[in-house]
Image (cartoon, rainbow, N blue to C red):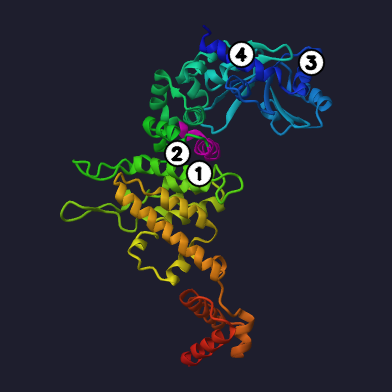
Amino acid sequence: MSTPEQDLLRRALGVLTEMAPAALELGEQFRAAGHELSLVGGPVRDAFLGRASNDLDFATSATPDQTQRILARWGDAHWDIGKEFGTIGARRGDVVVEVTTYRTDKYDPASRKPLVEFGDTLDGDLSRRDFTVNAMAVRVPDLTFVDPFEGLTDLAAGVLRTPIAPERSFDDDPLRMMRAARFAAQLSFHVEPGTLAALVAMADRIEIVSAERVQAELTKLLLSDNPRAGLEVLADTGLAEHVLPELPALQLEIDEHHRHKDVYQHSLTVLEQAIAQETGPDGAVPAPDLVLRLASLLHDIGKPATRRFEPGGGVSFHHHEVVGAKLAAKRLRALKYEKQVVKDVSRLVELHLRFHGYGDGAWTDSAVRRYVTDAGPLLERLHRLTRADSTTRNKRKAKRLSDAYTDLENRIAALREQEEIDAIRPDLDGTQIMAILGIPPSRDVGAAYKHLLALRMERGPLGEETATEELRKWWAERG
């Protein structure tokens, strides 16, 4: 009977023997020049998991200049943008490679950037990798497996462990602590106890890492298949206190009887439920969708600041969606997310409660039009966020909410058939307004436009004749 490690080796051998011939030829060229070349990191790990990749990372004994000369001969194109860190990239057909000189790196306590020192052995290079499952290598072209830190054993067990003492590893590069959370999400692995203890003890060390690098890891975590596992690592170790403090702040103990929903757990569940509603590549919200996932995670972050204990033992969070939208924008800007992501996520947080109250049937066509207009291009994401926000265990209540939202979607669809609800504009444009009223460009034109837009929202399409009558009437009443 085979062991889990032997099963993984057989699987990896199948993947590696089908590796693009161009990559194996590259190994021949390095060997002919007197240099070592080994496939390292994620591509090796993924081969054991049965996943092939055309983006390949290599480590070499060659200097960056020597590597560049070889890649210039081998590839259709090559680049040296990472040369100061020892990395040269190249492409040949569909195969993209990055080749890095053996190295060690560490942080100066006062610096946000790693100091790079080139090494001279493969084992030494592997020792600076973040986790043992990423510290395996395959020498090319002969496909010799190198595993000095028992990464294959940890891979079979689903364990994240550092190849050297975790305190030293995290001190050398604190971003590895974020990677622990990211790989917990991507691989559904658990963090080994000693490594976890070091995460807790050294969480504040993440402060020296640039926001851009932290954001990149958080994004990869959120776009994984199981972000909840990674977010729990962030919260449980204290890392979140430094990179996303709004998340642990949701762990409110509302009252001593725990009668109220745990906002932290609720938010993680909403995230999972939103992910379940993402679509295929041709759907309305193709998976994985960063904006939807961020909005789902952050939709209730305004609750701690707005919590009020009401007479009779109740708790309220009035306007938490407005406060939350501002907090979300502030945090995402601090993490250096692009402006459109900040804008879209904060808008979804602001709108996530808009639906509540619809179930009583009081919404007019005008209210439905405003819902669609206010959501704009975010409407499909808002549909999914709103549905995901129902985490009640009361099946009757859950069905009532679901049915009410289905009714709203049906009304939106019906209005779409009657009018251009997704791009509502007044029946008259600015040029027509000026011609009818005999006025030049001015604030009056803007005021007239807003009046006609409000009428369009309230009554639907008016037609040019009726709109003209309403415009003249409004103008006369203004005196």
Range drawn in magenta: 206-223
Task: Give the residue displayed 61% in from the left and 90% down from the top.
Answer: 438
User: Residue beneath label 4, please?
Assistant: 10
Tell which of 392 and 158 is nearer to you: 392
Q: Nearer the viewer, mark 3 or mark 4?
A: 4
Q: Quadrant of residue 360?
A: bottom left
Q: Nearer the viewer, mark 4 or mark 1?
A: 4
Residue 477 lies, with reference to residue 145, above or below; the image says below
Q: CA distance from mark 4 to mark 1?
A: 42 Å
Q: Main secondary structure of the magenta part?
A: helix
Q: Nearer the viewer, mark 2 or mark 4?
A: 4
Identify residue type, mark 2.
Answer: Val
Task: Give the residue displayed 67% in from the left and 13% down from the top.
Answer: 120
Residue 335 circle label: 1
User: Residue beneath label 2, please?
Assistant: 243
Counting residues from the N terminus, which is met first, the one under dot 2 or under dot 4?
Answer: 4
Q: CA distance from mark 3 to mark 4?
A: 24 Å
Residue 283 lies, with reference to residue 94, above or below; the image says below
Counting residues from the N terminus, which is met first, the one under dot 3 or under dot 4?
Answer: 4
- Residue 251's spot in the image, x, y percent? 31, 40
Q: CA distance from mark 2 to mark 4?
A: 40 Å
Q: How many residues crowd mark 4 within 10 Å: few (<14), some (14–19), many (20+)?
A: few
Tell me if label 1 and label 2 are in contact, CB under 8 Å: yes
* Mark 2 residue element: helix
Tell which of 291 and 106 is nearer to you: 291
User: Residue beneath label 3, please?
Assistant: 28
